[in-house]
Image: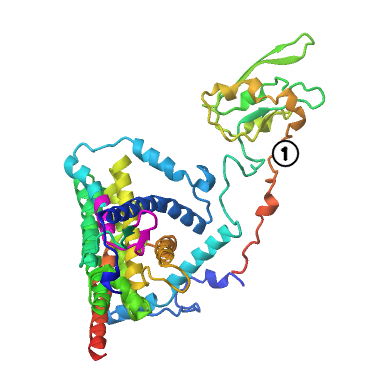
Amino acid sequence: MEATMLPEVTAAGIIIKAIIVLAVIAGLAAFGTYVERKILAYMQRRLGPMHVGPHGLLQLAADGIKLFTKEDIIPQHANKVIFSIAPVIMAATAFIALGAVPVFPDFTIPFIDVYVPSIASDINVGILFVLGMMAAGLYAPLLAGMSQANKWGIIGAARTAVQFLSYEVVTGLSLLAPIMLVGSLSLVDFNNYHADQGVWMVVYQPVAFILFLIAGYAETNRTPFDLLEHEAEIVSGYVTEYSGLRWGLFFIGEYANMITIGILASVVFLGGYNDLWIFPGWFMIIVKIAFMFFLMLWVRASWPHIRPDQLMWLCWKVLMPLAMVNILITGFVMMII
Amino acid sequence: MGLEQFKNRNVGTQNYTKLDLPRSPVTGWCKFKQVVSRTLSGELFVGLGVTMRIMVQSLVGGQSHATLYPFEKLPISPRYRAIHEMLRLLESGHYRCIGCGLCEKICPADCITMDTAYDKNQRKEVTEYTINFGRCIFCGYCAEVCPELAIVHGNRIETASEQRASFSLFDDMLTPIDNLNLQQEYQGFGAVTPNADENIKKTPLAY
């Protein structure tokens, strides 16, 4: 694809893209809570929310009103500044990370003739930026747990540090092999790589895909690795003392991160927003993101979670060597071919 | 099979069947092999399959353990001891209570208070009858002792109320005279649940 053929990217296009990302993804993140409750309920032979609206669809609004109007409590001995900032870090980093992922293909709005690019800002280190932002988001549980003068919070914060140190290596190393193949850090280049090759990256890099999924679940605190806020052990971990809107920010941030991981996995490994057969690209990326989201809920309904020491053991002694071997093999194969 | 071999306490003389358990891994390499075999054994995917099957069953087949509680309620066992009801005679519509006072005497929580008088036909009438539901332990002795089947346990299990008085007066517990044809007879303490047939399952005797 020639770069000169693309229409000029205007400020209006960027703003429209940002609105799409913020409004749609934030809405989806909130809607994801409803989807999660419904799917978990069906997997456990329950019905889930049923009373507010048809099949509980308006439960979302009821929860939102409840969260907004709840009393905002700051514990007496908490560090008030850090306690207040921590939820904002969570939500802000989640949405900043979303700013640099391509969601839908390029399109031009017909009548006003505004070109909307596939990505709000195609920075040339896109994948590093997204991963870095999501890693920075881990400061939120860390600071929240340490600032709230609560022992469960402290344990949750300690587990955050443990988890952070464990999975971050695997995330980087697992993505290194696809980066070597593509030869670029821009997520748009990843997408175009699929279009050029005709097959998905997961065919070339199945091990990296599985490693990235495992590390992604650790990154978003999803169930096999939800040590940070596991109720049975540490009440709610780092969110023990939070209430109302601040707790809601943590929640939104977590679900936005789940969608980010879904988009990353789709763009890097599963063919991105390229057309597939008769299906247009925007439809395919929605299907892929929805599948990745569903997979997280499916895993949560099916599998037990593991202990912190098991997570460290798994990441450092199993996944990291596997990722290293994968990189080495990829490198040798690239040298030979 | 007799009990002899279980009564034999001399350790070492019985015929034990040894379980064929694999030895637990000793070296790091053995542990790694165990992890790999367990990871690739597919048990995790069996778990995923179970949840997917259950989801399809509950979505398509409509199999669900949940009831939409305020709108649909499960039948209550006749043995359940809920808020009391005072029954009426079906022929005359007069309340069945003859004012004998046995329920007041047998009540271990001392929560039944009644007062009686002779009416103009020299027949005992109940002038006052209250049950203090703050004290009642729902033991069911009053219903058991009643010679006329006048006081029974009904099926009002939703006992949230603004004040106890809405339950405890005689007139509130008495069957409304308009609903006399709907009055449920007390089935006795041995009665089974109305949906008992549906709940019956095969006893797993296979083991």
* Amino acid beneath label 1: Gln
Image quadrant occupied by the C terminus of chain A: bottom left
The residue identified by callout 1 is B187
Q: Nearer the viewer, residue A40 or A307?
A: A40
Q: Give the quadrant of residue B3.
A: bottom right
* Residue B196, above or below B117: below
Q: Residues within 10 Å of mark 1 (few under 14, many from 20)?
A: few
Identify the residue shown where x is 72% and y is 39%: B187
> Quarter-wise, where is residue A301 in the image?
bottom left
Q: Is residue A307 visible?
A: no
Residue B27 sits above or below residue A157 on the image: below
Does the magenta run of residues contain B54? Answer: no
> Quick check: B160 left or right of A152?
right
* Quarter containing the N terminus of chain A: bottom left
Task: Find residue B24 and report its image quarter.
Answer: bottom left
Question: How far from the left and from the top, in percent, is residue A283?
Answer: 44, 64
Q: Chain of mark 1?
A: B
In front of the other: B20 or A286 = A286
The residue range painted magenta reads: A91-113
Which residue is found at the position 23% from the left and 38% from the top?
A75
* Nearer-the-camera pick, A276 or B53: A276
**Residue pictured at 28% horizontal, 51% vertical:** A237
Q: Is residue A212 visible?
A: yes
- The residue at 36%/69% (across/down) is A272
Judge from the rendering whether residue A174 lies leftward or rightward of residue B90; answer left or right.
Answer: left
Residue A178 image offset from top left, x and y in percent? 27, 76
Residue positioned most to the right: B91
Q: Nearer the viewer, residue A30 or B148?
A: A30
Residue A99 counted in the magenta span: yes
Q: Is residue A199 left or right of residue B114?
A: left
Q: Secondary structure at mark 1?
A: loop
**A157 up-or-down from A206: above or below:** above
